[in-house]
Amino acid sequence: MNRYFVMAIAALGSVGAQNLFADGTLLAPQAFRAAVAMVEPSLVRIEGFGGVSAAASGGHPSPGEGPTTGVIISADGHIVTSTFNFLKKPPVITVVMHNGRRHVARLLGRDETRKICLLKVDGVADWPVPSIAPRSDLRVGQWTVAVGLGSGTGQAAISAGIISATSRISGKAVQTDANTSPANYGGPLIDLDGRVIGICVPLTPGVQSEAAGSEWYDSGIGFAVPLDGLAAILGRLKAGETLRHAFLGVQVQPFGNPPTGAEVKTVVAESPAAKAGLAVGDRISALGGVEILDAAHLQSVLHRHLAGDQLEIRLLRGDEPRTVTAELTIPPVPAQKSGSRDRSSAK
Amino acid sequence: MKSGACLCVVGRRSLRELAPRYVVALIVIYLAAPPSVTAEELAIVKAAETAETARIRAIEAVYGSVVSIYGNERQGGGSGVLFDPNGYALTNHHVIAGTADGGWAGLADGKLYRWKLVGTDPGGDLAIIQLAGKDEFPYAPIGDSESVRVGDWALAMGNPFALAEDQQPSVSLGIVSGVNRFQEGAGLNQLVYGNCIQVDSSINPGNSGGPLFNLHGQIIGINGRGSFEERGRVNVGLGYAISANQIKQFIPELLAAKIAQHGTLDCVFSNREGGVICATLNLDSPAAKAGLALGDKLIGFEGTPISDANQFTNLIATYPAGWPVKVLVEREGRQKTLHVRLSALPYERLVRASIQQSEKTPPEPKQDKGQKPGPREPSNAKAFPLSDAGKVRDAKLNREMAQRLISQWRASANGGGSSLIESKGEIRRGGQIVGWQILKLASGGQVSAEYEIDGQRTTLLCDGQECSKNSQRIARGKAMLDPHFAQGIALAALVEDDPFARWGALVLDGADKAGNRWCYRLSVTDPATSEQLFIWLSAFDDAGLPRIQLVKTGVGLSDDEPIASTMYEDFRPADGSPIPQRLTLVRGLAEEPMLEIGDAAGATPAGGGTVAPDSTFTAAIQIAQQRTVKIFGAGIGRGAGYASGILVGPNGQILTTQGVFLSAENLRATLPDGQTRTATVVRRSNELQAALLQIDSATPEWFDLSRRPEVTPGDWILAVSNAFKVTEGSERLGVNIGVFSMRTPIDARRGLLHFPYQADAVLYDAITSNPGAEGGAVVTADGQLVGIIGRVIESRSSGTRLNYAVPVDALAKFVAGEGPAASAATPLAPVKADLGIRLFSLGGRRGPAYIDRINPGSPAAAAGLKTDDLIVSIGGHVVRDVSDFRRIVESLRVGVELPVEVKRKNELITVRIAPVEEK
């Protein structure tokens, strides 16, 4: 330890940025370890028993088959993890604490847009809860460590990286270049103080299937859903709700140069947009109070909301400004998909 | 006991605010620290955080300069970086080739700006676009790629996968894996990456055209390619960036609104008789006319010693056509320096097949040299027909740029509103005063130059309309030919409102070198005589910022131009305008000084601008590179015909992994010095999936396998290998960085096959699961061997690729002939063990392990297990389903008691059971 102490003083005392980077680099591993040690007691290894057959993936184990990771978020046994970990829909779930004790857990609600869900272990108290990094503290370029118990050995797998972006996927995620994969999906992304920045999940913008995003594992593009500001969502998950992607029902094109909104090209019949009275040619200028830049931006802003939300839409019809409210629904099931579902239910 | 909470409270925010005064921060934290956290621990964390804060600030300083580039319909997407406040941004040719000549650009301020194409370089995959809509854009300085060292931290920024809905770029951190890399192009002379930088900072589709920064916030390259393979189009730890110095060479060419071409000496050099020999030569070429002859041995190019023909090919790929180069050759034992302007390499529309619609399909990288097609020339590029290569594609844009450069020069000279400049100086030859010169310049086109050299006096006068020499009227174009008068014309720009307008048409010729600086070359053409005056303006200051200064004027571009040119130095204010205090008349491309005008004691501008590399890992990387070899054999199907290996003894012992390459008849190992030797397989290990090879050569640098480094989770590891066969010969192997995660047995497969590996694996987060990386060295930050990179495998439980090393202790036993390291497999029991449990089998092998029946009198019955109990674990092994149960029971030993955990209703119950012999 003493050796490092001397180095640390050298780093702090030097005026050159050069030594700062070099010594900071050499000391970083100890900072990583200290941070991991702080969060480790709050991690659980999740195991699922039984579940959907893996035969569909051609004999290969399907993703999410091995043990996975969860983070304790309440002293009375609430655990947040990734929905990726339950692709097999196991009927029985247990969690193993840092001290090796196993508990049976119940699956509560899930947020399909963030790929997170809640587990509950009943009849426990005083479970260690990690501290949470405020979102406003996050800086692009700060160290991150992704921690997971998914390798199945009881040891924590760690990967170091930085915050690549503080707001991604409609603001629902932080982006990191630490490796994220089934080894740490459901586990925490932490800062050097051992505070939880977010929960590692596989995500891809625009794609809503359960495993989407896992194809980017270990690619330097990783996502973590921040826990800060998530109280309302977690409350709904505790109540067992399933939160789904929002559907408005308009196709839009850019409007103006530079773009100052999105012009409605088509309105899906019976959709929330149709019910709210949106018409072809309307120029949407704001969703939920957020100014819309262009068509692509509209999609991003829309997906900050969930199915069931009331969404205030500001628009221009001709020169006349209007405000309407739509109640967002879940996306309609595409015809092809419903077909395949029929087949699977038939067998 | 550690207290996490107190670190949170006292920690980072206060540090951030105090970061520049970190010593103060340390004291504050000491005082505030509770006794439960040791001062040492805090100091370590804080030192790491201070470096972190410095990095965050470096990022913040340049974040605004990063551009997300889209087409007109906001489709596709790539990245770019602003290097000039006027909205000029660098990107890749292949990015703009997919979006034509205009579109939208997003900046970190969340806004979209129009962009239009200025110039492009299909040969080097570079382009410049201009953003509109803001008076002054944020921009970043361009660094010196020659000072980039392997192991330096590098930050890649851009818009991978078009994730930036809010236009805020993504930032990824890695290290420089290699320098002087070559990545083959496509078609004829297109998309070649010469002398480029290899990085392990994550670069994905969409990052193309974006900047690679050092930790000082300087652009060291433009990211354009990556090595990808069957995992699909995601980063696997190998990205390539066009080097900053190539970029600086091409910026003036691209700002001239040209379709740039690359340069050639119009000859072929080959490695022969231990030298780089001119093997074929176009006798009409400028190089031949400058004196290059067949058989000449090339020993230097632009100041770089040349020892290999490939090295020269790599280097010259970064120079634009027309660039003046210094070539050092040896003929019959005598050295000779040639100065010649490079000829233009042609483009041809050889490849029309592939249309790059967007960054979603960026060019395929090279996988095997000469085997796979590289990136292809987009054929939809109507905005820049390759038949117009070398030409200005937009004359209006070019003229505007020329005017803008003159204005920028005037602005940087800070005219001060003076309308008259008078400059007097002595003329020296070799330090001896041989005459004097007086220049007088006034607005309205009045220029006079009066000088006397060796007693001969000349007076040139121009009143804005007519010119005279020694009282004889001469054409204005002829007056321009006098170098002293030309100085007056150039400097008069500082007092003229519309400089050069009365002298002729001003255009930006493009990139050129003058006074050893990257320059813009402009020309003024006299309409009556067609005589031209050339003006060289520096493109960058020493800090890599776009600061314009006058460097040179002259009337000729060839090496044998008889009329002297003038070099300008030491700008100091005089009469309100900083004017050059030292002028030198020079001759030829070598700029040989002939006469000096002005203050002989003038100071040479300070160098500087270069940044000492952050060399934390340099020593460790060199140790590993000196002990790691490239192995070449035969490839079969998906199995790569190449790998890496480490030297483990002084007499040519090499360790590598198993692989199809070993079956080659001519298995070869290329040593770090470039020597290639035939290798034979001495021994193989199925359990380690390793092989010991022997070459007939002394190998003085080798890894001592008896040394076992202590590695702790979080420690840096460096992986040195020939992933994707990026290097050949003596080229240094690439390096990837990561942290050590754990040492553990693994359960893995290769494709559908079982992976028979029996030892522990060292897991880390560097990406090494790549063809060719197998057998490479994994070392600690102080260069100690951790193990060799294992074969490409997938985890059975997650299906993901594992990045791991075979640990050094297991390797040592193998080399010593001791067989595999402690085997993790439990040998099969000679007798079958039985617990007396029958499971529900309706759910199949994948169903949960619910107990259907307990055999009466069995150990399970004695332990109190019941029907409907769910077996959760046996002996600590998880029983996820029926097949797990069967597998585990098969490995049990009779009579050895072990815990069995079951779930009964919502309770977990653990019992101890000793299996009996199966009846």
Image (cartoon, coloured by chain):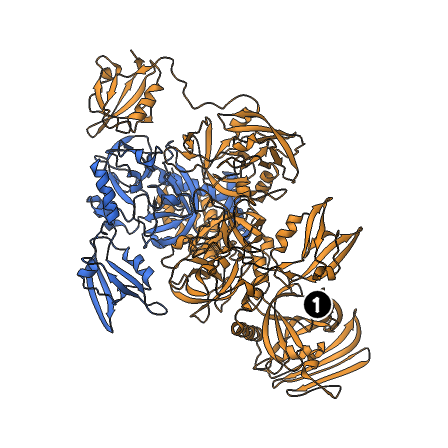
Chain colours: A blue, B orange
Q: Residues within 10 Å of mark 1 (few under 14, many from 20)?
A: some
Residue at horizontal 65%, vertical 40%? B673
- Vertical relation: B67 (above or below) A69: below
User: Does residue A93 appear to the left or right of B598 in the view shown?
Assistant: left
- Vertical relation: B880 (above or below) A322: above
User: Does residue A159 appear to the left or right of B543 in the view shown?
Assistant: left
User: In which quadrant is the N terminus of chain B drawn?
Assistant: top left
Residue B462 location, x and y as percent?
67, 86
Asked if one can make out residue B40 in the rendered structure from this viewpoint, the answer is: no
User: Does residue A305 appear to the left or right of B14 in the view shown?
Assistant: left
Asked if one can make out residue B470 in the rendered structure from this viewpoint, the answer is: yes
Residue B8 location, x and y as percent?
37, 47
Please tell me which residue lies in front, B637 or B918. B637
Residue B701 location, x and y as percent?
64, 35
Q: Quadrant of residue B346?
A: bottom right
Q: How many marks?
A: 1
Give the residue pinned by disc 1. Answer: B558
The type of residue carrying mark 1 is: Ser
Q: Quadrant of residue B692?
A: top right
Please tell me which residue lies in front, B509 or A22. B509
Please tell me which residue lies in front, A66 or B528. B528
User: In which quadrant is the C terminus of chain B drawn?
Assistant: top left
- Vertical relation: B502 (above or below) A181: below
Residue B83 location, x and y as percent?
51, 63
Chain ID of residue with mark 1: B
Q: Quadrant of residue B705?
A: top right
Instruction: Assign a secondary structure to mark 1.
Output: loop
